[in-house]
Image (cartoon, grey):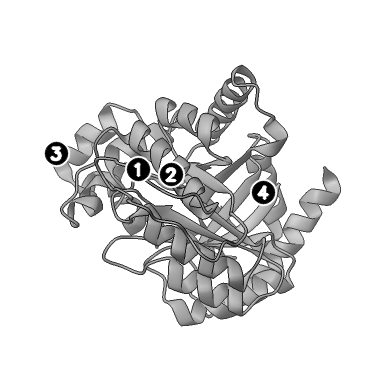
Amino acid sequence: MRVSIAFSGFAPIEPSIATVQAAEAAGLDGVWSAEHITYHDAIVPSALFLQNTSTIEVGIVGLTPYSRHPGMLAMELASLSELGKGRLRIQVGTGDPALVGKLGKQIRRPVQTTTAFIQTLRQALGGSDMKVGHEEYAFDGFKLTPIGPVPPIDMLAIRPKMVEGATKVADGLSISVGASAQYLAETVAAVEKHLADNGRSRADFRISALVVASISEDLKAARAPLLPLFAMFPPDSAAVLAKGVLDPVEFPAAVAKSGPLAVMKMFTPEVIDQLALVSTPDDLADAFGRYADTGIDELGLMLMNDPAQQPDICKHIGAARDALAASA
């Protein structure tokens, strides 16, 4: 199983560079930058990460057809490809409806819009002469120059129809933070069935899972910053991801009634430990093993530790990843 570091749009950019370099030195597989509307974008951090590394994969999470024109995105990605040929990968999804709404947009026909966006973006990146009309964007004679390597494009999806859509048009599936082991294992099984039905190879399709992670000798202190983060998640999506851990009806209803207080009450230490990676450095290999057992291909760790601590934590992550690989 691949192990990578992921940065949220809330994370400061400059301290992240030291963590990215430490991740590469520790032999980790990738570094991911997530985009959150009204916070940091993901293009600028990715350019810095590519410029300050030489081998590690750099990924972009959270690109959405409701915030970017595929032509402009193709231009940005072509520029990034010049900085790190063959090291770029992107993940496209619908995004959070509340954040998309801040741009004056509504999420309409999410499966069709996202699959069309991926197909259109791939055509634009490949240098096609574009004449495309869509309700969210249009082209009239757009042709990208220069053309660089076309990066793999994964789809961000958590619900069944989106997951199935990913197996038809994307190079992989990316699963959001907050997923239970049961959800991950069942989604991997569903992906493998859809791929077989579509005549696609499982070996060529990457399933990634982002996970909130806090690594410390003091597990109680490690859990403390996770509650406010979980309180920000859309409750309906959180309930889907937390299959077997949170009741899919009771949890959204409790949040609708009591707001963040419901999260504070329902996210007990036992629940947090099933939906996030909370571990001591010595127990990391076992924690990684539990995720590997679900069948995913890549684990993206969104570290909640202080940025100053993260470079040293990358050393522990690298050692644990190597131990997991040796035991496989």
Circle nearer the viewer, 1 or 4: 1
Q: CA distance from mark 2 to mark 4?
A: 36 Å
The reply to whether callout 3 and callout 2 are in contact (CB within 8 Å) is no
**Circle 4: residue type:** Phe
Circle 1 Cα neighbour tier, 10 Å, few/some/many (<14 / 14–19 / ≥20): few
Mark 1 / mark 4, whichever is N-terminal: 1
Q: Is 140 located above or below residue 78 in the figure? A: above
Task: Please give left or right for residue 203 compared with residue 251 in the image.
Answer: right
Task: Please give left or right for residue 237 compared with residue 190 in the image.
Answer: left
Q: Which residue is mark 4?
A: 288
Q: Is 237 located above or below residue 210 in the figure? A: above
Mark 3 / mark 4, whichever is N-terminal: 3
Residue at image coords 57%, 22%: 194
Q: Secondary structure at mark 3?
A: helix
Task: Please give left or right for residue 43 compared with residue 292 in the image.
Answer: left
The reply to whether callout 1 and callout 2 are in contact (CB within 8 Å) is yes
Q: Which residue is mark 3?
A: 257
Q: Secondary structure at mark 4?
A: helix
**Circle 3: residue type:** Lys
Mark 1 / mark 3, whichever is N-terminal: 1
Circle nearer the viewer, 1 or 2: 1
Relative image position of residue 25 (x, y in whole percent): 73, 74
